[in-house]
Image: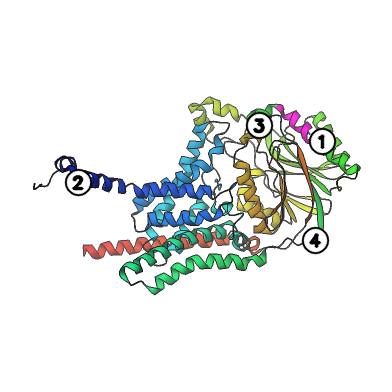
């Protein structure tokens, strides 16, 4: 039978034997979309609490295959699917107590940044040495996501999934941008190596320069990471300090625990008393300083004499300076504050959290959100105010830099404490709201990256766990379980030298953003010239 031009449906009816092939063609069209989403899931699996850091490389290799040579519009859609595959499971903890709507809204917004990156990667994928330009575009997307909207949300930076990986020493070279760039470059380079190898097999010809660049895209990040190991050290430069971390636990997990603020304070005072008793009995070495978590006293001790007495008694019992996480009110404004409590003098210094959490410590667009759902505004009745200065406490003979919880995700917030003289870093946190989700492990991995980035011991006292002590080489030496009262005591090195990452600060990120802009400009300009030539 001879078949003339007809619609697909008519053709399927006239030629039953061709129907499977037609359906297969339609299904093949969905392969890139499916691959984009699944490669995003693969990237998520590379993040803690799993130690499958290396999966980030094949995840970006597949993402590169999906995007190379496509239009920017296709890249936009495929990038959005990649972002959903990655961020939906990564950020599921944000809906533990407030429901799925805020979680889905957050992911939908954050995935837009990944979509724009996908469009950018598609555009530069036609350039020579495209893995370099594409990796820079990814870092530019991370830089934007860390700043807007609402002062940014850097959660999910590629660097934060590499705490157990071979690339980690690169954090000391140029911080999270350089570490993330190396991982993404290696992934895109891996795809290019495979693509060129397959092309050479089919055509027996491949450009040597393109092959060399592809191989270097894989080799340079690995070799650079090995070379950077010399920057990683846990040797003491300014002696040692014996630190104690107090995890008092909470009466129960979830937002409700704020209604039991006094119980949380009592728990942390009780655990400090237990430590003091062990020290007195000779079972535990006496610490030089004690670190309590964020929100360990949500009862303002300056406004509540009873709370003041409880904290003061605990400090006197242990006999050393204590850093207390509290919520205080001054001049009608609320602050998430760390208070330096001297056993003899009482409160002598304080640090107000500077990077406060939107929708957690303050509510943007309050009137709009209240119009949508008044229950959401009731969860955050009082907005917190921001601190303005770095916080470095002089505790015994150590200078302790304070980075409160959410701040650990922001490069500038950690670096400012080190450049202000911190010899060790404390990340007091309160993760009780997020129950037993992966959030606490993701945040712990951030602290491990920060330890290597700035070559400092990092302590992580948490209300309900996981509390931990991290050496300057990123290794965890002690940690607690979750939702148990506990304390950790350890002699840790004090360091004052600065890594290259500490010294250069934001410059590597700026350089990579400029590389991304240069690649996009080159690609767009070449496309415009090509269209003009065809029109002519």
For the residues labelled 2 and 3, the Cα–Cα distance comes to 59 Å
Q: Which residues are magenta?
A: 260-270
Magenta stretch contains residue 265: yes
For the residues labelled 4 and 2, the Cα–Cα distance comes to 77 Å
Left or right: 453 with respect to 307?
left
* Location of mark 3 (residue): 253
Q: Earlier in the sequence, mark 2 or mark 3?
A: 2
* Location of mark 4 (residue): 238
Quadrant showing the C terminus: bottom left
Q: Earlier in the sequence, mark 4 or mark 2?
A: 2
* Location of mark 2 (residue): 18
Residue sitting at x 55%, y 28%: 376
For the residues labelled 3 and 1, the Cα–Cα distance comes to 23 Å
**Foreground residue, 344 or 9?**
9
Q: Earlier in the sequence, mark 2 or mark 1?
A: 2
Give how far across and how far down residue 31 sits, in percent: 35, 49
């Amino acid at each position: 039978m001879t078949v003339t031009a007809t619609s697909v449906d008519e053709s399927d009816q006239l030629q039953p034997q061709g129907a499977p092939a037609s359906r297969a063609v339609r299904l093949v069209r969905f392969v890139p979309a499916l691959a984009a989403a699944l490669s995003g899931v693969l990237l998520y699996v590379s993040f803690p609490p799993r130690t499958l850091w290396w999966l980030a490389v094949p995840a970006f290799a597949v993402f590169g295959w999906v995007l190379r040579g496509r239009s920017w519009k296709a890249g936009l859609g495929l990038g959005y699917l990649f972002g959903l595959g990655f961020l939906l499971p990564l950020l599921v903890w944000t809906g533990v107590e407030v429901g799925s709507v805020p979680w889905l809204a957050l992911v939908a917004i954050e995935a837009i940044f990944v979509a724009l990156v996908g469009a950018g990667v598609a555009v530069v994928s036609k350039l020579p040495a495209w893995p370099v330009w594409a990796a820079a575009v990814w870092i530019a997307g991370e830089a934007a996501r860390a700043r807007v909207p609402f002062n940014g949300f850097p959660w999910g930076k590629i660097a934060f999934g590499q705490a157990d990986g071979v690339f980690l020493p690169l954090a000391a070279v140029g911080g999270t941008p350089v570490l993330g760039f190396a991982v993404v470059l290696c992934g895109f380079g891996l795809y290019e190596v495979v693509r060129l190898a397959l092309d050479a097999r089919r055509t027996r010809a491949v450009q040597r320069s393109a092959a060399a660049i592809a191989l270097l895209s894989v080799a340079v990040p690995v070799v650079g990471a090995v070379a950077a190991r010399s920057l990683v050290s846990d040797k003491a430069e300014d002696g040692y300090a014996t630190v104690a971390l107090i995890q008092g636990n909470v009466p129960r997990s979830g937002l409700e625990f704020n209604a039991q603020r006094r119980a949380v304070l009592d728990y942390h005072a009780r655990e400090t008393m237990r430590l003091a008793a062990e020290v007195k009995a000779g079972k535990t070495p006496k610490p030089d300083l004690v670190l309590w978590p964020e929100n360990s006293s949500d009862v303002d001790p300056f406004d509540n004499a009873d709370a003041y007495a409880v904290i003061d008694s605990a400090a006197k019992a242990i006999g050393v300076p204590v850093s207390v996480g509290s919520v205080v009110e001054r001049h009608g404004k609320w602050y998430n504050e760390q208070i330096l409590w001297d056993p003899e003098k009482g409160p002598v210094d304080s640090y107000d959290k500077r990077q406060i959490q939107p929708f957690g410590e303050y509510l943007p667009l309050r009137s709009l959100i209240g119009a949508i759902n008044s229950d959401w505004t009731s969860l955050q009745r009082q907005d917190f105010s921001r601190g303005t200065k770095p916080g470095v406490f002089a505790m015994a003979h150590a200078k302790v830099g304070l980075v409160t919880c959410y701040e650990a995700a922001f490069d500038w917030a950690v670096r400012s404490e080190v450049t202000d003289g911190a010899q060790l870093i404390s990340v007091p946190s309160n993760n009780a709201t997020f129950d037993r989700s992966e959030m606490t492990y993701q945040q712990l991995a951030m602290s491990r990256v920060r330890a290597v980035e700035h070559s400092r011991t990092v302590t992580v006292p948490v209300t309900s766990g996981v509390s931990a002590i991290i050496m300057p080489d990123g290794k965890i030496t002690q940690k607690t379980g979750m939702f148990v009262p506990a304390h950790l005591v350890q002699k840790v090195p004090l360091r004052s030298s600065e890594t290259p990452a500490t010294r250069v600060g934001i410059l590597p990120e700026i350089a990579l953003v400029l590389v991304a802009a240069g690649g996009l400009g080159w690609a767009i300009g070449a496309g415009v010239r090509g269209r003009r030539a065809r029109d002519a």
